[in-house]
Amino acid sequence: MTQIYELARFADALLETEKTPDYPAALNGLQLENHSEIKGVVSAVDFSTRAIEGTIKAGANLLIVHHGMFWNGLDPIRGPVYRRLRLLIENDIAVYSSHLPLDRHPSLGNNVLLGKELGLKSCESFAKYAEIFIGLSGESDLETATLVDKARKFASSYGGEVRATPFSPKQRTKRWAMCTGAGASTDTLKEAAQMKIDTLIVGEGPHHTAVQAEENGLTIVYAGHYATETLGVRALAEHLGKKYRFPASFVNAPTGL
């Protein structure tokens, strides 16, 4: 029998949850316990009604998410907040969440897996947060248009779209960096400039990053916040499913971003 606390301890150690700084609302780790033996796991990017309903439909009683139950901060337990909690408790579903620990994991992380999807081999870290690095960087020699096309095909498989800042049709990507999710910021663009990065792959970023990038000769590929963060939760759920011998599945619930 696999109980939730046994599984959560293993996942915390695997992801180095306690050693990884994060935003206060992340509350990485086990966010809601359950009573029964774990019989199946479902993963989703976001904690939502669609994710919970997908877990129930799959006959699972563990939901693993990247953006957890408290991502919006403090909310009264009423309306949709109450309805989600009621669904979880009535169906005895546990919730485990991992944000930055999953972004940066060397084999199950969003960044390393997206790099593989795009055919990029990383060799350095990128995107410093506190005392850790979230993203990756490396060297390549391929047409930037080809890289953008690969990103577009990946994003479309999760209901997303890709946008890129202007670049020459003949441009080649020689030094790239990556930070999934909301990876484009003033700080990451400064870091990219210091590292002489020519192409930055992210999920999303504020409007000013596109202006700033063009001014500094940097191409940014915005591959979608949602799409770029689907890989880690899927990989973690599958890893736990194999270890504890229960089925694992994924709820694809695109946000349009």
Image (cartoon, grey):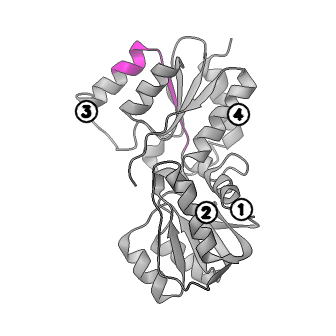
**Residue that badge 1 annotates:** 119
The amino acid at mark 3 is Pro
Up-down relation of residue 211 to residue 222 (above or below)? below
Residue at x 48% of width, y 63% of height: 162
SS class of the residue under badge 3? loop
- Marks 1 and 3 sit apart, C-alpha to C-alpha, by 45 Å
- Marks 4 and 1 sit apart, C-alpha to C-alpha, by 22 Å
- Marks 3 and 2 sit apart, C-alpha to C-alpha, by 43 Å
Is residue 96 rendered magenta in the image?
A: yes
Q: Which residues are magenta?
A: 86-98
- Marks 3 and 4 sit apart, C-alpha to C-alpha, by 35 Å
Up-down relation of residue 7 to residue 165 (above or below)? above
Up-down relation of residue 93 to residue 124 (above or below)? above
Sequence-first tag of 2 and 1: 1
Q: In this rendered view, identify the residue nearer to me: 173 or 189.
A: 173
The amino acid at mark 1 is Gly
Figure quadrant of residue 257 = bottom left
Determine contact: label 4, label 1, CB under 8 Å: no
Marks 2, 4: nearer the viewer: 2
**Residue that badge 4 annotates:** 239
**Residue that badge 3 annotates:** 76
Determine contact: label 2, label 1, CB under 8 Å: yes
